Image (spheres, grey):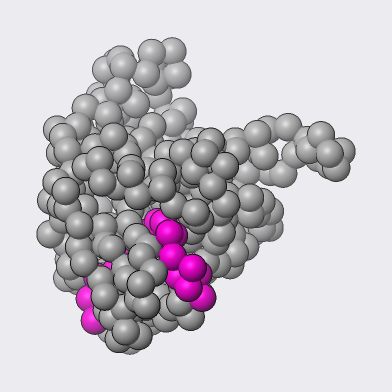
Amino acid sequence: MRASLVLCFAAAFACRDSGSKSERDVAPSAKSGGAAKPPSTAKLATDAAAKSSPAALNDPWAVAADPADPPTLGERHRIADEACPAIKQPYFYRIEKAGKVSYILGTRHFGVSLTKFPPVVQKAIASSKLAVFEVAPDDHVNTATKKVSLPDALGPQLWSRYQTLVGAETAQAVARGAPSTAMIAMMVMYEDIGSMLDMEIERKVLAAHIPTRGLERGEFQDKLLDKLLDLRMLRAAIEHTKDRNELAKESRDDLAEYCSGTDDSPGMDEDMRADLLAAGYSKQEIDEIDEEMVFARNADWIPKLEKIFEKGNVFVAVGADHLSGPRGVVALLAKRGYTLTRVTQ
């Protein structure tokens, strides 16, 4: 099942919750004396992926000793480097109106390091007076998630298939939790979770003491994640994923497409739509998922971005799927009188 949209959407939250302020999930606040916040849905999923093989814990560059084990962190890193040695056509735009200039970068939340981008991107980050993300770095989310027994909810046949796809250890880690957690763990199986672009940008701007802002709240994103990546979607993903080779190919192809800068079709691709139709979704339901995941959020961001761009010198980082197409952020800003120029070197 091709799920690049799901991966891009879900990984944004994993990146947020596993980001540079990781202490938010580890230690109580020294100022407030409060208890540590429990990790969110997306963090649980990426933690499960990172711990999916004992070899990965002891030696991140090892090769999985057992063919039934998921790929180690080192293997995932090698896959990412082969698929994307460098990014020569970034989704990176100069935005100008009334003499005020800002920049926006379309990110891929997993598998890509900032070092693979041309220097112009890092220069724009360093010279910015404000950095804007989908969710602000200091948005400490603590959304309650309904936990279910996935082996019971899926049934023995589908649960066994899921265990084969992700490995017994990962399956055990997500067995009692939200379907979205299990879905993300499956989608990031072959992703280089050691390279999180948004997290790197966040660290860079925080180190430079550049103010930050978010376009939406973490609580909204987590609720949307759990709503759309529900048990029905998880069933469809398991049923229509042939094997691990398919997961590996999807990750490689999606990463290579991002790095070549050639993906200009936001929302679900035809393969994923076909899989969901075969799983019982209607065309209207699929369109509604695209609307909630991408297009409605794009429209909501535009007035916020217009206000933010008034002073110029802003750097914006959002998922690349939000920039493309006639309902993408680039086209919507152009309709508001902004001049957008794609910058590739």
- Asked whether 128 or 188 is in front, the reply is 128
Q: Is 218 placed left or right of 118 in the picture? A: right
Using the rendered view, name the quadrant where residue 235 is placed. Answer: bottom left
Using the rendered view, name the quadrant where residue 25 is placed. Answer: top right
Quarter containing the N terminus: bottom left
- Asked whether 317 or 341 is in front, the reply is 341
Percent x, y of residue 269:
20, 68
Q: Residue at x 67, y 39 (%)?
A: 24
- Asked whether 330 or 343 is in front, the reply is 343
Query: Does 325 appear in magenta?
Result: yes
Q: Residue at x 27, y 17 (%)?
A: 63
Query: Does 206 appear in magenta?
Result: no
Percent x, y of residue 228:
46, 68
Q: In this view, does 332 lie above or below 45?
A: below
Give the magenta range. Answer: 307-327
The outermost residue toward the front is 99
Q: Is 148 placed left or right of 57 in the picture? A: right
Q: Is 3 placed left or right of 87 in the picture? A: right
Residue 315 visible here: yes
Number of disc labels? 0
Q: Is residue 176 above or below residue 73?
A: below
Residue 318 visible here: no
Q: Which residue is drawn at 32% across and 84% down?
A: 337
Using the rendered view, name the quadrant where residue 31 is placed. Answer: top right
Percent x, y of residue 198:
42, 47
Percent x, y of residue 54:
43, 19
Q: Which residue is drawn at 31% across and 68% down?
A: 95
